[in-house]
Image (tube, coloured by chain):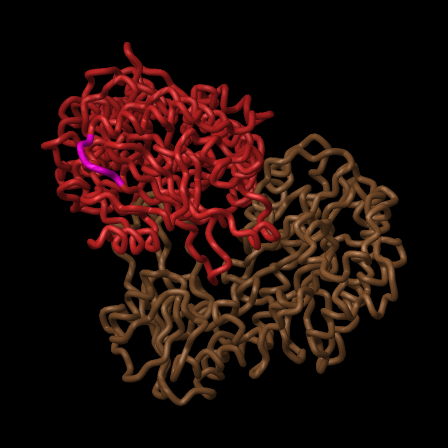
Chain colours: A brown, B red
Amino acid sequence: MTSWPSPTPPEALAGRRARLRERLRGPVLLASGSARPRNFPAAKYPFRAESHFLYLVGRPLEAAALVLTAEGEVLHVDPPHPDEALWRGETPTLDELSRELGLAVRPLDDLTVPEGAATLPPQDPEAARWLTEVLDRFVEEGSGRELTGPDAALADAMIELRLRQDEGALAQLRQAAEVTAAAHLAGMRATRPGLREARIRAAMEAEIVAAGMSPAYASIVTVHGEILHAERHDGRVAPTDLVLADVGAETPEGWAGDVTRTWPACGRFSETQRALYEVVLGAQERAIAAVRPGAEWREVHRVAARAIVEGLVALGVLRGDRVELAERGAAGLFFPHGVGHLLGLDVHDLEDLGDRAGYAPGRTRSQAPGERYLRLDRTLEAGMCVTVEPGFYVIPRILDSAAELGELAHAVDRAALARFADVRGIRIEDDVLVTATGSEVLTASVPKAPADVEAAMRG
Amino acid sequence: MTSWPSPTPPEALAGRRARLRERLRGPVLLASGSARPRNFPAAKYPFRAESHFLYLVGRPLEAAALVLTAEGEVLHVDPPHPDEALWRGETPTLDELSRELGLAVRPLDDLTVPEGAATLPPQDPEAARWLTEVLDRFVEEGSGRELTGPDAALADAMIELRLRQDEGALAQLRQAAEVTAAAHLAGMRATRPGLREARIRAAMEAEIVAAGMSPAYASIVTVHGEILHAERHDGRVAPTDLVLADVGAETPEGWAGDVTRTWPACGRFSETQRALYEVVLGAQERAIAAVRPGAEWREVHRVAARAIVEGLVALGVLRGDRVELAERGAAGLFFPHGVGHLLGLDVHDLEDLGDRAGYAPGRTRSQAPGERYLRLDRTLEAGMCVTVEPGFYVIPRILDSAAELGELAHAVDRAALARFADVRGIRIEDDVLVTATGSEVLTASVPKAPADVEAAMRG
């Protein structure tokens, strides 16, 4: 059984705020957001606070605002309404919250907005409207891609802090990884031919909910792994299917796990499934081995892509010179997404700021088929956390499209590919921390080698 | 194992649209809403379409709009983008959708907004902005409480339709009830002293997810039943605790189940728990027996309140004349919420329109302590679906407050109440359909009698 999530200590949060203030001249105002109505005003989606707020305050407080100035730090939040206690129970007073967080806490009504305060656009429209009002300038929700002036400087300072995970962040990511691992084990054990995908998803998410966490993103649990973000779970699992599960847990403070495993519905990989699984696994292992400080992420992606090409040439699915095929982007025919992304408080960390975080200054997205979906293009540094997730997919829209195939059309041996008809999609994904000397796989406890996966499925 | 959800047939949906058009002179434009960003634009909350749209179209289509005029009906929705297929799989073309729904389907770009079209304010801010733009008048999300002109007429027509459930709606509500029942059984079976509440919640929600449904509202699974909408699940279940679970399933089309059960953590009610449980159960049974066409909902509430008072007098917790105590609102000290609410596409059905649906024209909320939280005040009619959910709670904020107690302070026998220290909160809730001659409990398969609950916990 996994342990109950423990919050980031107040000193760690204070350290983050201090480091942010050191990096910035001007004042900052950040909103926490509010729960969004679902089908009527009182029925809301589960509240998820804004990530930048969570990074600095560490508690999912609703309708709160953090003010940082040269003079100090104040958290503003409305005191609990007495009538609310009947419905929601007692919540901490502002004094109690202040003691718990080691931070001055005052009512929202006492907010004085510092002149020229920088902010970051929230995802919550209500918070965006509130910021627009109190800052007296237009703040649009979700508009973090196009920032200027103090907001851009704040974004850059936050990126600088959040790109490398501190000790408190690592403690959170390890907790998320532990529960994510439990979810995958539960999924493997719950799988039986004849069940629907939804039953396996339910078993996985139950581990996450039982551990006091939430799914970090829309869970993918599918026998159609070739649909990269499959959202349906109504399919029945056939004995010859592979089940692909891309499921992660998020701590109450918002830190994410993000793991994919692919396992055989019947409990044993067929020879063809195992052969392609080993190709993807080899690619993932080589990519992880390439993760170290100073390495270019683009190169990690290419290591994986080359391994996919080499494996497919060895199996006869691709024909030609492996180096040349790799250079011509043959991997992209079967592995059309990037090898991974930043991981942290967001499952695609800092993606609210567009490519500002994922791409080093001066770099922009490539248009090459194999690389246009790269979410990250930076030199790796110790403390960064990334996912490494190559895959192999048989995607008719690519393999049946002259436009997508281009000159690579003759490189695909259709007869050879047809022999692997019991494989539609395989992805293997782990969460990897860049260490001082190399890397550490945070999700190493999730079974991955075929024999380990088969053993886990036996329970 | 529960069956997989089946959608409402197109003819039933066409019938609803026809009935709405008969009731209205003018044209209608309704939006389906869009998925709301969670922590960054690509990471969204699970999409839940607007209820009025779902009622008429029956499919949770994103960013769609329904136009009804005297001349006809058109559903507008953008055709699937080819690039999306890579990530989300193939989605039906507009032609396929049109055949499935028996309705003309055109791209959003082809939308012609009928002059003077009525609409209902969506919960989704994005949809509200879109309606504001295309209707050229301000539509604010979640503003369904204050409608005028054609919007008010549309609201009244929708209420007239939705107050009485048609055959298609009943089929959906029965499916939701079936899965809700499975969830409660799973919760009873999963309960063991020493577990956290979250583990029981996980077992219950897993049944819902496995059945292809979603939780219809934020699940309450708590040993603190006296907190009416307890949102925490971190408490450990002690052997002497009662577990209160208020959990319901929602079909993919949005129809809700809403059931509460309360069971003993150790698998056997203590004498004191059983005594108070029987009081609440008796109140619920008498209230359900009072549900019939022509009955006033306020009177159903009072039947439950009187039964609570009588039971507490019999147990010595209340002192005095039962009729007089009931008239003075003594039930409200231990049962401070309404006996139930409308149930349908929303768990509090039509609550997006405020009390316009729940309260008959000309009626407004009472300020009496026992009745101010009544969500419904109408004469019952066959076809209405309601929840019946009396409770007993020991709420310090009420029982320790001179203001709340008023002249009833002396009516509470503190020593007698203290003998029931192993009870903090009990609620028993079922989903009840008003039939031509009385009522039908849609959720009758969820164990309720103490012996049945204990048997279900043994598995």
Q: Is residue B438 above or below residue B305?
A: above
- Point out the residue furthest to the left here: B362
Q: x and y percent of residue A331 in the render?
A: 76, 62
Q: x and y percent of residue B274 in the render?
A: 42, 25
Instruction: Tell me, yes or no, if residue A73 can be seen here.
Output: no
Q: x and y percent of residue B374 in the render?
A: 22, 34
Instruction: Tell me, yes or no, if residue B313 can be seen here.
Output: yes
Q: Which of A169 and B278 is in front in this view?
A: A169
Q: Which of B94 and B250 is in front in this view?
A: B94
Residue B254: quarter of image = top left
| Main SS, magenta residues | loop
Q: Residue at x 24, y 19 (%)?
A: B381
State the quadrant of the C terminus of chain A: top right
Q: x and y percent of residue A155 in the render?
A: 46, 78
- Point out the residue furthest to the top here: B437
Give the total of numbered labels: 0
Q: In this view, does A383 lie to the left or right of A217?
A: right
Q: Which residue is drawn at 71% across and 82% down?
A: A294
Q: Which residue is drawn at 50% across and 70% down?
A: A354
Q: Is residue B335 above or below residue A136?
A: above
Residue B330: quarter of image = top left
Q: In this view, does A172 lie to the left or right of B421?
A: right
Q: Nearer the viewer, residue B16 or B367?
A: B16
Q: Is residue A306 left or right of residue B139?
A: right
Q: Is residue B412 above or below residue A309?
A: above
Q: Which of A239 and B331 is in front in this view?
A: A239
Q: Which span is picked out in magenta? A: B24-28
Q: Which residue is drawn at 33% across and 20% down?
A: B433
Q: Is residue B324 magenta?
A: no
